[in-house]
Image: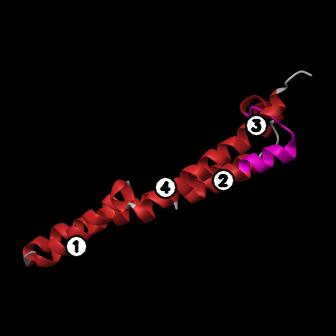
Amino acid sequence: MKFHKEYLDLILVPSGLLIMFAYHLFLLYKYINQPHTTVMGFENNDKRIWVERIMQADKRDVSTALSVIQSNTTAATFLASVSLTLSSLIGAWIGNTSNIFFQRQLIYGDTRPTTITIKYICLLTCFLLAFS
């Protein structure tokens, strides 16, 4: 029996999902039990200290705090824009089925139409979850 590239989806996708799920479970365990050892716990501690210092600061130092809050809001807006742009690009890519040759060269593994659609939907979901 010859191993075809279509079989890669049966091996790589479940193993990738398993690795990603195990990593997130490990990260959740570390965040709940030892939050100071994760980046999220470290940043939460820094934010708490920053808010305490800003609340004790003079009136003239409030502008610094407002500029930091504005920078965070700008970054969140930018990431939301990137998410919408990438989602629109993937949506247009899914809708454009006129060039089958391009899809077959670009996508490795199983290139049946249903599988390609599932791959695009998974990619779209990952972009939406990552950037929003």
Name the amino acid, label 1.
Val
Tell me which label, 4 or 3, sits earlier in the chain: 3
How far, Cα to Cα, is label 1 from label 4?
A: 26 Å
CB atoms of marks 1 and 2 within 8 Å: no
Residue 5 appears in which quarter of the rendering?
Answer: top right
Spot occupied by residue 128 in the image (x, y as percentages of width and height): 59, 58
How far, Cα to Cα, is label 4 from label 3?
A: 24 Å
Spot occupied by residue 94 in the image (x, y as percentages of width and height): 75, 48
Tell me which label, 2 or 3, sits earlier in the chain: 3
Name the amino acid, label 2.
Leu
Indicate whether residue 109 is drawn in magenta.
yes
Tell me if mark 3 has few (under 14), some (14-19) or many (20+) residues whose alpha carbon lies within 10 angstroms of its own.
few
Q: 24 or 120, which lies in front?
A: 24
Query: Which mark is nearer the camera, 1 or 2?
Result: 1
Tell me which label, 3 or 1, sits earlier in the chain: 3
Task: Please say if 41 is above or below 56.
Answer: above
Q: Residue at x 86, y 47 (%)?
A: 114
Which dot marks residue 27?
4
Q: Residue at x 59, y 53 (%)?
A: 127
Q: Is residue 9 left or right of residue 2?
A: left
Spot occupied by residue 13 in the image (x, y as percentages of width and height): 72, 42
Which dot marks residue 124?
2
Which dot marks residue 51?
1
* The N terminus, quarter of image: top right
